[in-house]
Amino acid sequence: MMLERLNAIKTEALEKLALVKDEAALRTWENTYLGRKSEFNSLLKGVKELPDEERKQVGAQSNALKQALYAALEAARGALADSGRDWEVERIDVTLPGQGHMTGHLHPITQIEHEIEDIFTSMGFGIADGPEVESEWFNFDALNFPPDHPARDMQDAFWLEKQWGKKKYLPRTHTSSVQVRYMQTHTPPFQIIIPGRIFRNEATDASHEHTFHQFECLVVGDKVSVANFKHLAETFFTAFFDKKIEVRLRPSFFPFTEPSFEFDVNCLLCNGVGCPVCKGTGWLEIGGAGMVHQNVFESAGYKRNEYQGFAWGFGLTRLAMMKYKITDIRLLMSGDLRFTQQF
């Protein structure tokens, strides 16, 4: 009798399940046929009162029915979930190309700096660094600047209002301030490069900025001459621009070198014809150079006339402009992503 009722429940439950169209009806069906108060559970409570042989048969049938009903319930639940999906929206065309993600990259100034460092390190140079906020002594005094030198004026330097004791500080106006710092802790011979950012209080235009990047080179030893500098400059610029570059030296004056000169290269933006960047001259001023003044060696703790050396510096931003054909130096530090994303 119980077996017949179990079979009837199974038949009825599966027929009712076939008519279910939504989640609410499915929950009602589950409570009706598998809930605690369902007829199926009531019948199971009476199995223990049956004779042994019949109890085994009814128990096995009850377990089979329960498993069948739960399997049918899960199948119906999955079918309802699938029926509510928009398969066209979820369709994936595996033949379409993947979508790329935007990634960051190095600023053009940083790219140029790394390239220059690679060239110099391949020639045996080391890399030195120093603070951007420098004391007056390292920025001017140790480099043989007289107390009344115009470079100390507000027209050329940004001075910090706060002083520490009698010391005055400023954002460095050149990377030459690292020269004495390095020489104080190193004994010649050595050859180093000093890349870094510098600050000058001057008007901006297509070829001048108040904040820009510079590159310093210092070579010190027993027998170092201007000829060594000339050869090094030609070697570097030839490697950097991957072509023979003409270098022009002009006599000049710097407190920290004697003799001193400025060096130019032919303007690659206009190929020497003349443009706003080179101010129509066909030449682009790259930097200054000269033999290190013996007063600077004394400031670093060396004996006078014990060593010889040359120092030269140039603007990284100028080289970036020539390398990438940039006509306005102000674009490099503008922060405009439309510009920097081109590199």
Image (cartoon, rainbow, N blue to C red):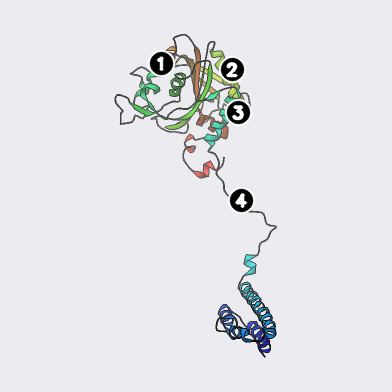
Residue type beneath disc 2: His
Could you tell me if residue 279 is visible in this image?
Answer: no
Which of disc 3 and disc 4 is earlier in sequence? 4
| Callouts 3 and 2 close, C-beta under 8 Å | no
Q: Residue furthest left?
A: 165
Helix, strand or loop for disc 4: loop
* Residue 102 point in image, percent of width and height: 57, 48
Q: Which mark is residue 100?
A: 4
Amino acid type at mark 3: Phe
For the residue carrying disc 4, how many other residues have a C-alpha within 10 Å: few (<14), some (14-19), or many (20+)?
A: few
Which residue position is annotated with label 3? 241
| Alpha carbon distance from label 4 to label 2 | 46 Å
Which label sits in the foreground, 1 or 2?
A: 1
Residue matched to label 2: 231
Q: Which mark is residue 299?
A: 1
What secondary structure is marked by label 1? helix
Relative depth, front residue between 153 and 283: 153
